[in-house]
Amino acid sequence: MAFFRSKDSQLGHLLRTLPQTGTLTWIGVRPARLTPLQSLDSVEAVTDQGLAGDHFNGKPGSKRQITLIQAEHIAAVASMLHSPQIDPGLLRRNLVVRGINLLALKDQQFWVGEVLLQTTGLCHPCSRMETNLGPGGYNAMRGHGGLTAQILQGGHLHVGDVVRINL
């Protein structure tokens, strides 16, 4: 299988071809465990730690220093729950992006504004989705939970920042 994913293979080339860019549309941090996310216009991303003011900040080496979800997937989840919209804060993700396929960033390094991230895995839903979104919330989120990432190069994130693959 590694042969087909090598950088020189056709599939390897396709996996690195992502000319589209996205936009950061929402930022949220949780100051303490089990507290609601606070929506922010900007936040500092600290290299190998997390977001300033988020309770996950300060855990060097963690594979879940920051979480991202696609705005288009939030709309899909809302549709499955027969709801006109969902407050992004209920989904417990730090960043909402629009206009780029987050799954295409799996196993990739990518920029959000001046911050360099490395995807570390999929962000699967937890049982709190049932509480936050109502009956069926967990299942509606399956396959739409977004990504987890590490912060390779910190800096400030701002709503409106461009999201792009690191070439």
Image (cartoon, grey):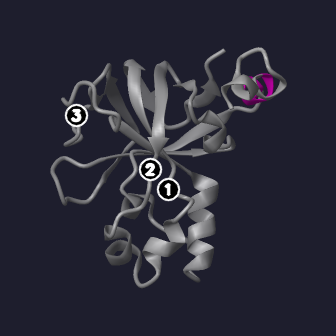
Give the x, y percent position of residue 155: 38, 19
> Which sits in the foreground, 16 or 52?
16
Let me know if residue 113 is in the magenta part.
Answer: no
Q: Which residue is mark 2?
A: 123
Type of amino acid at the residue the image marks with label 3: Asn
- Drawn side of residue 33 relative to residue 85, left or right: left
Q: Which residue is mark 3?
A: 57
| Image: magenta residue range | 13-18
Type of amino acid at the residue the image marks with label 1: Gly
Disc 3 on helix, strand or loop?
loop
The first of marks 1 and 3 along the sequence is 3
- Drawn side of residue 119 relative to residue 126, left or right: right
Tell me what residue is drawn at x 21 percent, y 37 percent.
53
Disc 2 on helix, strand or loop?
loop
Label 2, label 1: how many angstroms apart (C-alpha)?
A: 5 Å
Tell me whether circle 1 and circle 3 mark residues in contact (CB < 8 Å). no
Tell me what residue is drawn at x 73 percent, y 29 percent.
15
User: Which numbered dot is residue 145?
Assistant: 1
Picture quadrant where residue 25 is located: top right
Tell me whether circle 2 and circle 1 mark residues in contact (CB < 8 Å). yes
Label 1, label 3: how many angstroms apart (C-alpha)?
A: 20 Å
Type of amino acid at the residue the image marks with label 2: Cys
Dominant secondary structure, magenta: helix
Q: Say which quadrant the C terminus sits in.
A: top right
Give the x, y percent position of residue 71: 59, 54
Give the x, y percent position of residue 120: 45, 34
Q: Say which quadrant the N terminus sits in.
A: top right
Position of residue 108 relative to residue 89, above or below, is: above
